[in-house]
Image: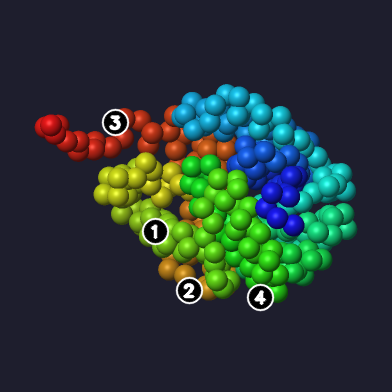
Amino acid sequence: MQASDIKKVLIIGSGTMGRHIGLQNALFGCDVVLYDLNEDALKTAVVHIGKIAGGFVKGGYITEEMASAALARISTSSDPAQASEGIDLVSESIPENVELKKKVWGEFSKYLPKDAILTTNTSTLLPSLFAEASGKPERFLAWHFNLPVFIANIVDVMPHAGTDPSVTQLMVDYSKRVGLIPIFIEQEWARYVFNEMFTTLQSSAQRLAVNKVASIEDIDRCWMVILNAPFGPFAIMDNIGIDTNLNILKEAVAADPDVPYGKEVIAFLQAKVDAGELGRKTGKGFYTYPNPAYEQPDFVERVVPKYKK
């Protein structure tokens, strides 16, 4: 199989990451099947994918024709057998829980074509932890994205020790085909490259907030102004999903109970999740959506070259 042979992609999990990954593959000519447990979740996902595509059109990244063609290539299914028919590539984006991932991959292993490439978008777990559950560990690896996928187009390609090297190379090639910059991870590393750096920032920001050192907004302002960034750590958490951040932190604290302020930050994030404030996907998180404060012109006052000739 070559990168050009991949025609049909299955996305397992219709949350924020699954929606972006599905749209990315569809924009570059693949038929995409979006799978989730129930039809309501899928209907919500389809509406949101349309909004994502609309945002890219508004931003000038794609044309209306490109958006319409991509959306027409996306179908949905809540039936694992039906969703698996004729699939060349699978991308899984379900919650960060080893046992849950084993269960889902074990179910799909009954139906997926024997030559399908199997990938996980896990952010913190090693693919070797559940590769066997896929039924084809030699065709299994991590394919990890950042948000928004089309613009933040770095993708980590991380095999485990049992991955066939030709499959890894195929995913490097396919990543380029669908407009992504592949970062080859030479050995299993739980937080990949960007996430290894970002989690340090994120942990610092969370510690500042739970200790009431500064407001959420001022913490984000510091990051945005000094690094000339469009958003700060809490805005990023909103876009990833506060529930996702909470699950990742719980895994980290379970592995190392001595994580500084781990319990306090868990309680801090849990309160947001319990209130249904998960970030952009629910309309409220650390900020309110649409049109969050950090996107407004007066959120930061940037210095500009007034006298440049």
Q: Residue at image x 62%, y 37%?
A: 27
Q: Residue 72 in the image: x percent, y percent?
A: 71, 29
Element type at marker 3? loop
Quarter of the figure that contains the N terminus: bottom right
Residue identifier under label 2:
258
Circle 2 residues within 10 Å: few <14, some 14–19, many ≥20: few
Q: Give the amino acid at mark 4.
A: Ala
Counting residues from the N terminus, which is met first, the one under dot 1 or under dot 4? 4
Task: Give the Cα separation between the discs numbered 1 and 2.
Answer: 18 Å
Element type at marker 4? loop
Q: Give the amino acid at mark 3.
A: Asp
Q: Residue at image x 63%, y 63%?
A: 169
Q: Which mark is residue 298?
A: 3
Q: Residue at image x 63%, y 52%?
A: 174
Task: Give the Cα separation between the discs numbered 1 and 3.
Answer: 24 Å
Q: Give the amino acid at mark 1.
A: Leu
Residue identifier under label 4:
161
Counting residues from the N terminus, which is met first, the one under dot 1 or under dot 3? 1
Q: Are marks 4 and 2 in contact (CB under 8 Å)?
A: no
Q: Is residue 53 above or below residue 77?
A: above
Q: Residue 205 in the image: x percent, y percent?
A: 38, 55
